[in-house]
Each structure stands twice: as C-alpha cells, then as structure tokens.
Image (spheres, helix red, strand yellow):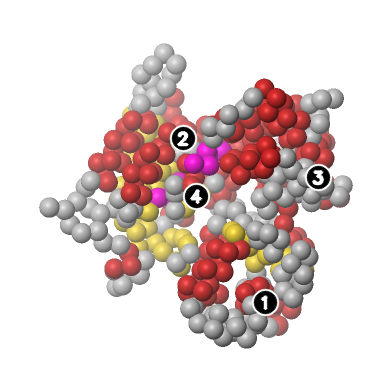
Amino acid sequence: MTSPSVTPADRTDAGRRFRTAMFVDFDNVYIGLQRLDPVAAEAFATNPAHWLSELETGTDSEGEFSRRFLIRACYLNPSRFSQFRPNFTRAGFQVVDCPSLTQQGKSSADINLVLDAVDALAAPTQYEEFVIVSADADFTPLALRCRAADRRVTIITASPAAAAYRSVADSVITADDLAELVTHTASTLDVETVVEEVAVAVEAPAQTPTKAPTKKAAAATPPPSSAARKAVLQRVQAADRPVPLGTIAQLAQKTEPTLPETRWAGAGGFLPWLARNVPEVGVSSRPPGFVWDANRFGEADLPGAVADTSSSALQRQVVAVTDTPGLSASNYRVLLTALAADLKAHPFDRAETSRRVRDACRKAGAQVGRSTVNFVIGGIIFAGLELKPTTKASDLALAWADNVVGLCRGARMQLSPADAAAIGAWVGGGLLES
C-alpha cells in the first residue's frame, strides 16, 4: 500500500520545499548550449555544483520555494564526454554511461532516463517535482505521466523545444535563461532601456498604452504591499514570456477575492489597480492583452506583434504553435540586415550582439524587442549556420527560414511546398527572393 501524496503545502513547518528528482540529458544540453553560447556550455559541463545551487530556490505564482534534490542523475555518452564525468560526480550526481548503440551514433540516454524517472515516479518517496534537463520532445510522454500523477514538472532546455513539450510543464527554463543561469550573469538591460520599454495601461484608451512612471516617481510613492501585488509580481517575473492579461486579473482576484467588491481598492478597475500597485510591470490592453516583466520584455516581444502589415492565417498559425516572433516581413528584413552588419563590425557575442542589433532595429524604426533578437539568433545557430564576419543577410535569412519551417513540421503542421515558400518569404524578410 502506497503512502498518500504529500505536497509542500501540507508541510507548514518548513515552507514550500519540493522533494525533487533531476534527470540531465547531458549530450542534448551540452551540444545545444555549444551552438548558442560556448562559454555557457563549458560552465554547464565543468561547474554543475554552481548552477545546481542556483536552482535550489525560486519563485512561482504561489510565492517563493526551495528544492531538495534527492535524485541527481546525469546521462552522458562516455566515448565523447567522459572528461566531464568527475565534475558531475563531485557535485553529487549519479552519472549513467550511455554509449552509442547504433551506427548512427545515437546513445541510450533517452531510454535510461525514462526508465529511471518512471521508477522514481513509483518509488515510496513521494517526489513532488521532476526536473527534466533536455530539449528533446521525446520526453513529452514522460512529462504527461508525471502530471497525471500530480507531480510538478520543470523543463530546462538548451535549444528550441516543441510547443507541445513546453506546454506540459509547470515551469520552463529556456536556453537563454539557462545560459545566464550557468554563467550567473545578471540582466544587461540598462535603466534607461527599462524605463523606455515599460508601458502601463492606466486611464488611457484601450488601444494606446501609456508610459510607466519613471524610477524616481516610483520611488517617491512606493506601491502598497498586498498579497495580490506580491502574487502578480511573482507570476510575471517567473514567466518566460508575457502573460495574458486575463490570467493576471484572475490571479489577483483569487488572491484577494474582495478586490472586485471594493472596485479594485478604490482604483475603479483592474488596469488602474495594476498601474497603481504593480508599476514594475508592463501592460498592453490591446486584445487579448498581456502583462510582462519590464526588465526582460517590451511591447515588441508580444505574440503576433506585426507592426506594419496584416498577418495571414498561415502566419498567425505559425506564431501560435511555434512561438516564432510575429514581426512583419519588413521588420524581419531590418533585423536580419542589422545582424549581418553587426557581425561584420564586431565579433559575435550573444549578449552584446543582441543588444546592438536591438538598438540598430529601433534606430531604423522597427520596434523589435531584445528577446525577439535572441530568439532569431538562437534559431539561426540551431539551423547550423556559423555567425562570422563574412555571413551575409541572405545567409541569415535562409537559416532562419529553415529553422522556422522545421519548428512548424516539428509541431505537426501540414505544410505544402507553397506554405513553406510563403513562410520563407515572410520570416526571410524578402531577402531570399533577392
């Protein structure tokens, strides 16, 4: 007879602390990070104790929590990566050798990881959280099994992961987040950029977001402390993308059910309450509406942010199922051209390159967010193109288009040759035609 499930909420003596089982698909993550950021890849492989300690605490929509990693398992191919074994052993990981068993060189990491995770799911110890460190969508059935057993699922990726794979997780740490985590670099957005990008809807018309108060103004009148404010701020800061406005409104009402009765604490409505109580976030009330962490995102990062043309049904579907940035073809052209020019002028560095390209796009009149630039750069790298001074804008366009078409097919979209060509013409900014 198995013991009843015990959740962190049942243990009021120690706060929210998850009994966690972590499974690391080393080959998948290391190779993915190498494409995106070689420095981050080496940090991931050589100092796992550091990023593991960074993961021991966190926040989500319910507040702060901590983790106790009861299982730390790392699966790697010893013929290729045996030099990293001591680093993980010293950090308390059980390292499982997964040699290549096929002529194609595919290792047995996937099956070993799944078997061990299923064993952990049935173990007398009630693991409350399963952390899967891999971008391989083959683990989607495993994540579904964990959710069905009422266990929290966290996915850590190092390359573009299928939307269906991310959607089964309670929490997702993206490739960019992982790169920053393992190298422990703080956000490089400066204060002026944050103030420029924050847009909060107050008493303005629904289609016209207004500027957020400046840092000095916010400091002069600090927002009142409340459970709803704390819950909203934690939810937005923990999200890996802008959050739908309705989700945030429901969270605030759930946390403080009396808010609607008091006309949102006298503010008159949810948007004015949000502007008054959580000025740190950005808000767009343009349907369907979104709320975002102003330190990481701007309006240009919103889903479907097509600035100067009407998007087609195909484009909207691509954006919906793959999270491809919904820029217009002309803005994609500006972005890809700016990236080619920057590569010619400066050595590639993920953080600095994305900042310069974002700034160049804005000077050219294209409202392109930095997370959008990072998404495109990551897609180009994962398509196999080396970013060097001789890389042309048309080369970038071809690699980016190939990546987007690959994401669509990975999401099981049925694309005709005409559809693939239309996607290439759109995300390639017309550079492929020329």
**Badge 2 amino acid:** Asp
Find numbered disc 4 in the image and state the secondary structure of the residue it sits on.
strand
| C-alpha separation, residue under disc 2 versus residue under disc 1 | 42 Å
| Disc number lying in front (3 or 1) | 3
| C-alpha separation, residue under disc 3 versus residue under disc 1 | 31 Å
Earlier along the polypeptide chain: callout 2 or callout 3? 2
Task: Look at the image and say whether residue 158 sits in the magenta stretch.
Answer: yes
- Give the crowd class for mark 4: few <14, some 14-19, many >=20 residues within 10 Å: many
- Give the crowd class for mark 2: few <14, some 14-19, many >=20 residues within 10 Å: some
**Badge 3 amino acid:** Thr
Q: Nearer the viewer, residue 142 or 285?
A: 285
Earlier along the polypeptide chain: callout 3 or callout 4? 4
Q: Residue furthest front?
A: 313
**Badge 4 amino acid:** Val
Find numbered disc 3 in the image and state the secondary structure of the residue it sits on.
loop
In the rendered image, the vertical position of residue 187 relative to residue 37, given as above or below: below
Give the left or right position of residue 263, taking residue 28 as reference.
right
| C-alpha separation, residue under disc 4 versus residue under disc 2 | 13 Å
Q: Which residue is mark 1?
A: 272
**Badge 1 amino acid:** Pro
Q: Which residue is mark 3?
A: 309
Mark 2–mark 1 contact, CB under 8 Å?
no
Q: Which residue is mark 2?
A: 136
Earlier along the polypeptide chain: callout 1 or callout 4? 4
Give the left or right position of residue 366, taking residue 90 as reference.
right
Find numbered disc 1 in the image and state the secondary structure of the residue it sits on.
helix
Earlier along the polypeptide chain: callout 3 or callout 1? 1
Earlier along the polypeptide chain: callout 4 or callout 2? 2
Find numbered disc 2 in the image and state the secondary structure of the residue it sits on.
loop
Residue at the image position 66 percent from the left and 50 percent from the top: 303
Q: Which residues are magenta?
A: 153-164
Task: Look at the image and say whether residue 267 sits in the magenta stretch.
Answer: no
